[in-house]
Image (tube, rainbow, N blue to C red):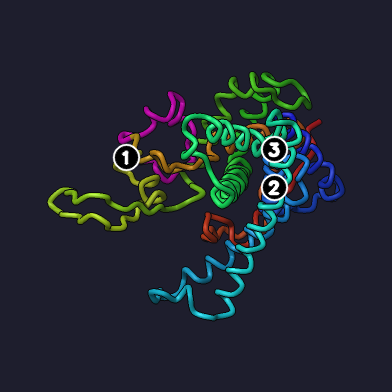
Amino acid sequence: MAPTMGDLTVEMMRKWEPDVKEKEAINVAEEFQNLTADIIAHTAFGSSFGEGKEVFYLQHEQQVLVSKLSSRIYIPGSQFFPTPENWHRKSIDKRIRKVLGQIIGKRLELGKATRGDSYGNDLLGLMLAANQGVMNGNARGLGMGLDELIDECKTFFFAGHETTATLLTFMFLLLATYPEWQKRLREEVLEVCGNKQIPTADSLNNMKLVSMVIYEALRLYPPAIALVRETDTDMKLGNKLIPAGTAIIVPIIAWHQDERFWGADVKEFNPERFAEGITKACKVPGAYLPFSFGPRNCIGQVFATIEAKVVLATILQRYRFCISSQYVHAPTVVVTLKPEFGMPIVFEEVL
């Protein structure tokens, strides 16, 4: 996967060249959204790349719609009202399911033609092969039907690009704001990868400073600022009784910036806090939740981290960068954390 990620990053940078020469700001928030969608479409859907990109655009529409609806007072059952918003929401979901159903249908036909030997050499193909293995084995009842496969595709497509785009966007803000860290990371990347070389799996494991910066960027700007969990039994928290079936909001961004957990420099960008790993960075390790935790954590977290390393390393080998004077710091939430007015960055070629 790393070569595909690197090649697509290089392709993106080629499109930047005219703006770089003219010292024009580039909105990396938008660029990284498109790049990560390209990457997940290639790695997850392979030859069905075009249809995969269509899913990306439809999911983006869903995000905007959900964000608008979530700001309103909720009336139980209102999702069934015959409003334009509900009609639009249902039509988008119907289109996504149709596109994914067609992609999966083609792969299942490929599997039949090869007698189950191949469903495609990508994430979707691997998932279908594993699912068919379960259904053909003794645990036939544990296999997934078409609707469940579509839901899984929707989840890993969203998780595989949205978290990385947010991480990359705010990581570039931080590195543009703290050029000394940008310099340190570039030196590490050049030492580990060489000049203008796409990182390999082995070189990714040797990027300690890059990992530290990723962890700190996720602490300050977690893609999901909160999550919701529901109690399955009655439980006590301190002297409070929480009944079964209670929805509990876990305020990730508040925990990530709580002085009791992180110390007096909690508001500062300090990747050194992760020098000895995640468990020793925080007084309460469970307070660090950029990808949630437990069995319902983000399925795209490993993919997102690898992708962020590859993209960052590939760009650092070629460019230094600073924040544009046009930038307005206004993080907002549209399902995930985003810069409301974009992230304009000015790039300069490294000689």
Q: Residue at x 59, y 57 (%)?
A: 339
Q: Which residue is mark 2?
A: 105
Q: Which residue is mark 1?
A: 261
Other-residue count near label 1 (Cα within 10 Å), few / some / many at <14 / 14–19 / ≥20: some
Q: Secondary structure at mark 2?
A: helix
Quadrant of the frame with the N terminus: top right
**Does 2 sit left or right of 77 as displayed?**
right
Please name the amino acid that badge 1 sits on. Phe
Q: Which residue is mark 3?
A: 43
**Does 93 sit left or right of 139 as displayed?**
right
Does residue 278 belong to the magenta stretch? Answer: yes
Q: Is residue 163 visible?
A: no
Q: Mark 2 or mark 3: which is in front? A: 2
Q: Quadrant of residue 175?
A: top right
Evaluate if marks 2 and 3 touch, with contact meaning CB atoms under 8 Å apart.
no
Q: Secondary structure at mark 1?
A: helix
- Name the one closer to the observer, 66 or 216: 66
Q: What is the x, y in percent for residue 20?
A: 82, 46
- Name the one closer to the observer, 159 or 209: 159
**Does 191 sit left or right of 331 as displayed?**
right
Q: Quadrant of residue 91?
A: bottom right
- Name the one closer to the observer, 95 or 276: 95
Other-residue count near label 3 (Cα within 10 Å), few / some / many at <14 / 14–19 / ≥20: many
Quadrant of the frame with the C terminus: top right
